[in-house]
Image: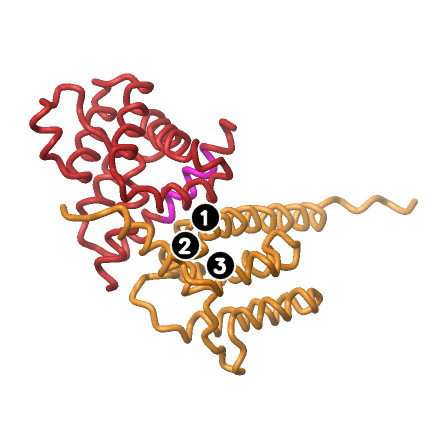
Amino acid sequence: MGQRNLRSTAVALALWSCSITAAASAEQIAEATFDDKMLALIAAVDSGSIETGDAVTQCVGNFAAESKTEKLRDVIAGFLGVPREAAFETGCGAVIRLLDTGEFSADDLRQLIEGKNARSKAVLSGQLLRALYFKHEAGA
Amino acid sequence: MNLSVSKCAAALSITLMLTACAGAPGSGGRSLPEVLNYARQHPEHRQANITDCELAINKRPSSFPFQTFFAGFFDVPEESGGQAFCAALVEATISGDFTQAEQDVFRKPTAIRGRGPMGGLLRDLIAAHERLKSQAADNEGTRSLPVASAS
């Protein structure tokens, strides 16, 4: 359970930034996994090829399209102190702003998804949650 | 990658809630819920409650690098992650942010209680940690204030 859960934990946090590039074809979108979409969005935000608002919209859309995100919605809502209905938009908004400002690096987010080191991913997960909290509180 | 969000939420739930609040016995036989109950009744024993909390969580087998996660979460050295978690949990409990009713919710199966309480507890924890940090800074500042001359 450990490695899978740890990895899943990291992805749960990082998935808040998950989405797809604007250039992806419909076929690619259909085939892309959550992680693929997340990595593509991170790349797009990191390169400046997508507007912040569009990135947030894509992120929210991805979550809305995934039926299994409802449980994560509750966690985010509780952690950020927002209604369930606003959870994804709030979480996605905070992650994208963190990336935009460089307060959380694209490399660290990639590491959360693709990294193999459990301890490294654990500390990054904690750091991302912390960063999300303060980003949200600052903007609330 | 073949990860699902349900796994993500389950992982968060398992690693945080079960580790924190499911009731593993500490060295003195006190489970974490018992430690928190005692903290509400005896807030003057804060340090002893923190110590008992650490004993309880250190006895709990977990494959998740709990200390490491909370080191990142609280922005403290890795070796201090567990201590910071317990200090924050006891502070949240004593302050009334983490109430008995909220604690009792975790006795219910996840399928019934949902994941919201876990998010709320994490929020309480980070707020408590920041409050303790601020208090420590204030105390440090008070100690370093120049003493007024009596003359």
Mark 1 or mark 2: whose residue is earlier in sequence: 2
Q: Chain of mark 1?
A: B
User: Is the residue under label 2 in contact with that under label 3 (CB below 8 Å)?
Assistant: no
For marks 3 and 2 on the same chain, the one whose residue lies earlier in the sequence: 2
In the image, are marks 3 and 2 on the same chain?
Answer: yes
Residue B58 lies, in percent from the top left, at 42, 72
Query: In the image, what residue occupies the spot 52% across and 62% down?
Result: B86
Q: Colour of chain A?
A: red
Tags 1 and 2 in contact by the CB under 8 Å rule?
Answer: no
Q: How far apart are labels 3 and 2 at the CA level?
A: 9 Å
Q: Nearer the viewer, residue A18 or A102?
A: A18
Q: Is residue A120 left or right of residue A36?
A: right
Disc 3 designates what residue?
Answer: B85
Q: Is A56 above or below relative to B106?
A: above
Main secondary structure along the magenta-highlighted residues: helix
Q: Which residue is label 1 attached to?
A: B116
Q: Which chain is orange?
A: B
Sequence-first tag of 1 and 3:
3
Q: Tell me the residue that label 2 is attached to.
A: B71
Check residue B72 for magenta coloring: no
Residue shown at 45% from the left, 32% from the top: A135
The residue under label 3 is which amino acid type? Phe
Q: Which residues are magenta?
A: A126-135
**x and y percentages locating residue A15 in the rendered image:** 28, 39
Tell which tag, 1 or 2, sits nearer the viewer: 1
What is the secondary structure assignment of the residue under circle 2?
helix
Question: Regarding mark 1 in the picture, which secondary structure is present there?
Answer: helix
Mark 2, chain letter? B
Mark on residue A129?
none
